């Protein structure tokens, strides 16, 4: 029996309007962790740790752009039920760019008592950094548009196997360990509780259904099992920890003195953000000023764009299978990649500090709900646009205590790292050649960026622009590891044994469901799949 026969609604079906809204909300909540994590991490490099109002505006902007890009992809792009959102593949080079000496945050921006968020000096500090990111993302996205609409993506996929993908994706997660540790270290008890709750829901309770009341004409009022722990483990874990922090704050269990350990776990630190945030906001292109372009930033973003394209190719095939659609033909894949490039261009123009990509967790949700209709994702896109317009929504997310965010990061970045390593199951790891390539790529991806960060003046070619390019590339772990993996895999004699890569290049002309699932795993980048 084909997979489409098991679906309640296939890709072209139109479910009742209320079901579209309910399932659309579910898809938004499934992608919630990845979408809000990106602006919260970027705020550290943008010197915005103590400006909750601007953080809320960034969250509203990324929700709005994600919704617009989702609608573009579903209507004009790959035309499959696949959600678009921020990507961690662009986060690594963005943070590398912001760590350069000229973009290091002034010391006074790290002290809450010295920060006046309405002063022109502070506004220029963070907006100048955002404009630098915007320009690099806009120019880098033009490359993705070119690759997509020209059909060059097929050429790239011939040379990229699991020994390139594994270190590239794993190092995305590993390179963010400092962000996770800094946030979690503000109160290890709260962060450990958040991590434990997410693990409990996603691993131990995932197969336990929760009865929910339902009604239809045949069964009348009855209960229907919903695997809520499998669908929303991150949201549930964060909400419970957030609530406990609120209770501990109300009863003054957490210290009220800023210099005491655990102070940052309080929920009233950004209480004024909710009152200051407007009910309606209208993010627009160029809201932070005219974007600036640097060669170093563009080259760094290109490394992330290539990784994002690899991820999306696998997601398209997975989404087609799970939604009851035939394998996407080459022209549809090209169109999807091209539209994603346009989405990244819009994200750069609006000033999210990030791009957009297809969300793997959304693909997984299709298999859980058995609803593969495009209209459900259209409803999700509209909902995200609405969330982006309501300023209070973004403000709510900025009040999440730092240790709770750190606990989420511990799980999220760990899963991203493991997802990269999982690609090695499609390489012959009994081969000393493949073991060497992967081990060397991973180790250099950790050693070189760490040394460059500790010795920022070591690169001095006499050409300032070249120094900046090398600085960004060599401090981006994802690029360093992926570069060595790519070069060695394509030059060292031997075979990587990547059957799934061959299948994807053949466009899945003759595959069964098991082969398809294997191929999907090879090219999956997990933004936050538990």
Image (cartoon, rainbow, N blue to C red):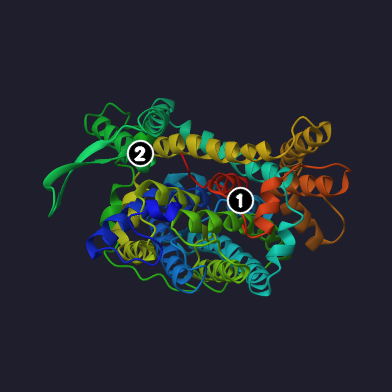
Classify residue 145 by image quadrant: bottom right
Q: Nearer the viewer, residue 425 or 449?
A: 425
Q: Which residue is mark 2?
A: 238
Tag 1, which secondary structure? Answer: helix
Classify residue 255 by image quadrant: top left
Tag 2, which secondary structure? Answer: helix
In the depicted structure, whether residue 64 falls above or below residue 514: below
Q: Nearer the viewer, residue 23 or 302?
A: 23
In the depicted structure, whether residue 84 falls above or below residue 361: below
The percent position of residue 495, horizontal first and vertical second, equals 81, 42
Image point (47%, 68%), residue name: 79
Res 53 seen here: yes
Q: Residues within 10 Å of mark 2 (few under 14, many from 20)?
A: many
Image point (43%, 45%), residue name: 112
Q: Nearer the viewer, residue 405 or 99?
A: 405
The percent position of residue 224, horizontal first and vertical second, equals 21, 42
The percent position of residue 418, horizontal first and vertical second, equals 59, 36
Q: Which residue is mark 1?
A: 95
Give me the C-alpha separation between circle 1 and circle 2. Answer: 25 Å
In the picture as drawn, the residue positioned furthest to the left comes out as: 220
Q: Nearer the viewer, residue 132 or 14?
A: 14
The percent position of residue 179, horizontal first and vertical second, equals 54, 40
Image point (78%, 54%), residue name: 470
In the depicted structure, whether residue 207 falls above or below residue 40: above
Q: Residues within 10 Å of mark 1 (few under 14, many from 20)?
A: many
Q: Nearer the viewer, mark 1 or mark 2?
A: 2
In the depicted structure, whether residue 324 falls above or below residue 200: below
Tell me which numbered mark, 1 or 2, is placed earlier along the sequence.
1
Left or right: residue 91 compared with residue 244: right
Return the mark for residue 43.
Answer: none
């Amino acid at each position: 029996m084909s997979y489409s026969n098991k679906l309640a609604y296939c890709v072209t079906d139109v479910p009742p309007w209320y079901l579209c809204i309910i399932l659309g909300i579910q898809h938004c909540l499934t992608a919630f962790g990845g979408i809000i994590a990106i602006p919260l991490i970027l705020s550290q490099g943008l010197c915005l740790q103590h400006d909750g109002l601007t953080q809320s505006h960034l969250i509203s902007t990324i929700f709005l752009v994600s919704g617009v890009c989702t609608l573009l992809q579903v209507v004009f792009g790959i035309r499959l039920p696949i959600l678009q959102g921020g990507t961690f593949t662009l986060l690594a080079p963005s943070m590398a760019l912001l760590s350069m000496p000229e973009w290091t945050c002034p010391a006074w921006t790290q002290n809450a008592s010295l920060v006046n968020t309405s002063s022109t000096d502070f506004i220029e500090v963070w907006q100048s950094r955002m404009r630098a990111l915007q320009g690099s993302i806009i120019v880098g996205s033009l490359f993705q548009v070119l690759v997509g609409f020209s059909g060059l993506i097929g050429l790239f996929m011939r040379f990229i196997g699991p020994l390139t993908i594994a270190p590239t994706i794993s190092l995305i997660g590993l390179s963010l360990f400092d962000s996770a540790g800094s946030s979690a270290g503000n109160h290890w008890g709260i962060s450990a509780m958040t991590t434990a709750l997410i693990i409990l829901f996603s691993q131990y309770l995932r197969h336990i259904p929760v009865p929910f009341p339902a009604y239809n004409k045949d069964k009348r009022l009855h209960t229907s099992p919903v695997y809520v722990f499998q669908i929303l483990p991150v949201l549930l874990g964060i909400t419970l920890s957030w609530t406990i922090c609120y209770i501990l704050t109300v009863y003054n269990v957490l210290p009220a003195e800023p210099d005491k350990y655990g102070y940052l776990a309080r929920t009233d630190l950004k209480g004024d953000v909710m009152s200051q945030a407007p009910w309606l906001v209208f993010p627009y292109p160029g809201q932070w000023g005219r974007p600036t372009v640097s060669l170093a930033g563009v080259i760094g973003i290109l490394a992330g764009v290539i990784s994002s394209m690899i991820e999306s190719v696998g997601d398209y095939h997975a989404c087609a299978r799970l939604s009851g659609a035939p394998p996407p033909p080459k022209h549809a894949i090209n169109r999807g990649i091209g539209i994603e490039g346009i989405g990244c261009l819009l994200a750069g123009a609006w000033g999210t500090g990030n791009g957009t990509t297809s969300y793997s967790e959304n693909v997984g949700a299709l298999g859980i709900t058995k609803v593969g209709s495009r209209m459900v994702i259209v409803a999700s896109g509209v909902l995200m646009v609405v969330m982006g317009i309501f300023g209070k929504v973004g403000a709510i997310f900025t009040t999440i205590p730092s240790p709770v965010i750190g606990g989420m990061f511990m799980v999220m970045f760990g899963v991203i790292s493991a997802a990269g390593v999982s690609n090695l199951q499609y390489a012959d790891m009994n081969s000393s050649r493949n073991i060497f390539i992967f081990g060397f790529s991973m180790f250099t991806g950790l050693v070189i960026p760490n040394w460059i960060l500790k010795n920022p003046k070591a690169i001095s070619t006499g050409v300032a622009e070249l120094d900046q390019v090398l600085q960004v590339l060599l401090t981006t772990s994802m690029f360093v590891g992926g570069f060595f993996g790519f070069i060695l895999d394509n030059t060292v004699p031997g075979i990587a044994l990547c059957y799934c890569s061959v299948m994807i290049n053949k466009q899945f002309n003759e595959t069964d469901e098991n082969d398809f699932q294997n191929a999907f795993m090879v090219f999956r980048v997990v933004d936050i799949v538990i």
